[in-house]
Amino acid sequence: MAIRTILHYPDKRLRIPGEKVDPARIADKEIQTLIDDMAETMYAAPGVGLAATQIGVALQIFIIDVAAEDEPSDLRVFINPEIIEKHDEIVWTEGCLSFPGVTEEIERAAHVRCRALDRNGKPFEIEADELLAVAIQHENDHLLGKLMIDRLGPLKKRLLHRKMQKRAEATQSV
């Protein structure tokens, strides 16, 4: 296992939609190593979710672990996810590993139903509320090339873009 580099906005690779994973490849060492690396990277960051696109791998895979610090790990792997139902609304303070140090109030569906394959290629459906529902939507957006900044109003979007642009320029000049 290895900790991978997380891409930070405005890196253009974050806008590349993930490609579906061939179910026959899920058991391959390459995919299993990717999932293990993603988990190690997410926990080291630390975060509650990570999409493959955030580490520059354009595949439809994301992971989530919303267990509290005093609870055992509850790592969930979503391959080729599809949100099949959304309802009600919730405003959640979201962060994103691709936007270090940033939190924003984002409106999402309060309840989702998602269909995906697990790390063994077995299909599953999950119904989720609150943090898990928000995390599923957030990570699924990454797989579509959509980012947290895209859900903000024009002024907040402009301010966050400038802040992240300055951060990127500062880290490039170091």
Image: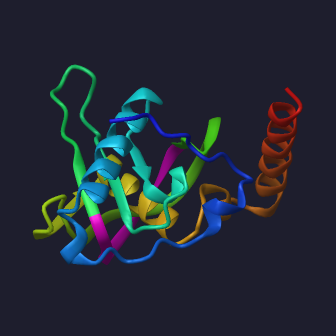
| Residue 151 makes an appearance in the image | no
Q: Residue at x 42, y 27 (%)?
A: 44
Q: Is residue 167 left or right of residue 6?
A: right
Which quadrant is home to the C terminus?
A: top right
Q: Which residues are magenta?
A: 79-94
> Residue 91, image x and y in percent?
49, 53
> Residue 121, image x and y in percent?
15, 68
Q: Residue at x 73, y 61 (%)?
A: 153
Q: Residue at x 29, y 48 (%)?
A: 33
Judging depth in this view, the residue of 81 and 105 nearest the camera is 81
> Residue 55, image x and y in percent?
52, 50
Residue furthest out toward the front = 29
Q: Residue at x 37, y 77 (%)?
A: 20
Q: What secondary structure predominates along the stretch shown in magenta? A: strand
Residue furthest out toward the top = 70
Q: Is residue 86 magenta?
A: yes
Q: Is residue 138 magenta?
A: no
Judging depth in this view, the residue of 118 and 86 nearest the camera is 118
Give the colour scheme shown: rainbow
